[in-house]
Amino acid sequence: MTETKRKSRWGIGIAVVYGAFMVVMIGIVVASRFQPVDLVSHDYYDKEIKYQDQIDRMQRSQAEGMLLSIAHNVKDDLLTVEFPAGVESSAVTGKLKLFRPSSASLDRNFEIKLVDALTQKFECGKLARGLWKIKVDWQVDTLQYYHEEELYVN
């Protein structure tokens, strides 16, 4: 009679293991549905098609020596962008984007408006710790340029 009880316990044990496995798997599926999924950009497909234009702007920047100098002052929460010498400041326009790869809600956009000097300071406020990408899309008259740089905030 003890052998019969042992056999029935094996069946119950196997059923409990399979049941626990199913509960865990269903829990993982339900939990994953509530995790935020931020795309790099909502219009990433359109941007991917236009990426060749960005490559051309980057190559033009390097070929013509139109490289920017970017410095981040943590103490004053300022981002300083210095444009190349020889450029007429009134002809420079564009946009600067502080891009946070891990969270689209932290991204910030600024307009480039040079008055007299070839330097512009942006009040970026307290940046969250981690990796940021600085993307500068600018132009002088009709020639377009692009500069991208990584910034790690401690």
Image (cartoon, grey):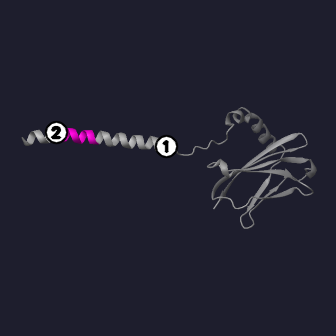
- Which numbered dot is residue 32? 1
CA separation in Å, label 2 and label 1: 37 Å
Q: Earlier in the sequence, mark 2 or mark 1?
A: 2
Q: Position of residue 63 (x, y in %)?
A: 81, 42
Residue under label 2, please give it.
Answer: 8
Could you tell me which secondary element the residue under label 1 belongs to? helix
- 47 or 108: nearer the eye? 108
User: At 26% across and 39% down in the image, what residue appears?
Assistant: 15
Q: Is residue 153 above or below residue 75?
A: above
Q: Position of residue 78 (x, y in %)?
A: 76, 62
Which quadrant of the view contains residue 121?
Answer: bottom right
Which quadrant of the view contains residue 119?
Answer: bottom right
The magenta region covers 9-16
Which quadrant of the view contains residue 47?
Answer: top right
Q: Is residue 29 left or right of residue 46?
A: left
Q: Amino acid at mark 2?
A: Ser
The answer to whether marks 2 and 1 mark residues whose Cβ atoms lie closer than 8 Å is no
User: At 51% across and 41% down in the image, what residue appears?
Assistant: 33
